[in-house]
Image (cartoon, rainbow, N blue to C red):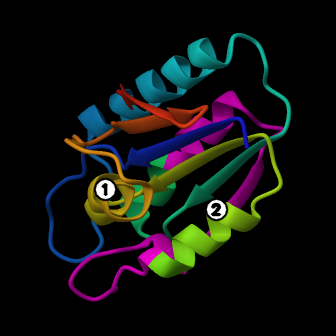
Amino acid sequence: MEKLFLLRHALDTNFEGDPPLSERGKIQSRELAESIETNLNGDNKDITIWTSTSRRAKETALIIWEQFPAATFVECEKLWSDESHRYDFDWLENQLNNFQGKILIIISHLEYVCYFPQEKLGFKDIRASCAGGLLIENGQQSYFD
């Protein structure tokens, strides 16, 4: 893979359970999609989007997908991490090791955006704000938001 965008969902409405995106979260998602497109410099081929099945992550991913309609879109229950959904870093590491595409955009949650890169990829000082995360390219990390 040439580029991995490991991103946290946009801002939600803070309701209990599985909240939708707030209006600000929808704006953040559109801005995130534009930032991804700018970073790709017109290279919009062979893009895959993986998303948590949580409402806030899926809504974020769907807005990004509007920017890249030819992208493959995959919902992954295991990318959902909260009190009811245990994260599985070994599973994600295995998925990344077997990924055959060129560009992968993952929309997930705090644990996968902040702690997974530290534990499995050896990166330090990760920020995981809503609608932000990491771009990993050529073994190097940079913050993405």
Badge 1 element: helix
Mark 1 surroundings: few (<14), some (14-19) or many (≥20) residues within 10 A: some
Residue 104 against residue 45 in the figure, above or below: below
Is 130 one of the magenta-colored residues? no
Q: Position of residue 96 (x, y in %)?
A: 64, 62
- The percent coordinates of residue 116 (x first, y second) are 36, 62
The vertical placement of 93 against 129, above or below, is: below
Residue at the (53%, 27%) spot, across then down: 33
Secondary structure at numbered mark 2: helix
User: Residue 94 falls in which quadrant of the image?
Assistant: bottom right
Magenta run includes residue 66: yes
Q: Position of residue 20 (x, y in %)?
A: 33, 58
Q: CA distance from mark 2 to mark 1?
A: 15 Å
- Residue at 66 percent across and 28 percent down: it is 67
Residue 8 to residue 136: above or below: below
Dot 2 alpha-carbon crowd within 10 angstroms: few under 14, some 14 to 19, many 20 or more: some
**Residue located 57% across and 37% down the image:** 64
Select label 2 or label 1 by which is in front. Answer: 1
Towards the viewer: 42 or 137:
137
Q: Earlier in the sequence, mark 2 or mark 1?
A: 2
Which residue is disc 2 drawn over?
96
Q: Amino acid at mark 1?
A: Gln
What mark, if any, has residue 8 been given in the picture? none
Viewer-side residue, 106 vs 75: 106
The span picked out in magenta is 61-89
* Left or right position of 38 against 120: right
The amino acid type of the residue labelled 2 equals: Leu
Q: Which residue is pictured at 43% across the width and 81% down the height?
A: 88
Q: Quadrant location of residue 87?
A: bottom left
User: Residue 10's spot in the image, x, y percent?
Assistant: 33, 43
| Quadrant where the image shows the N terminus | top right
Q: Which residue is label 1 attached to?
A: 118
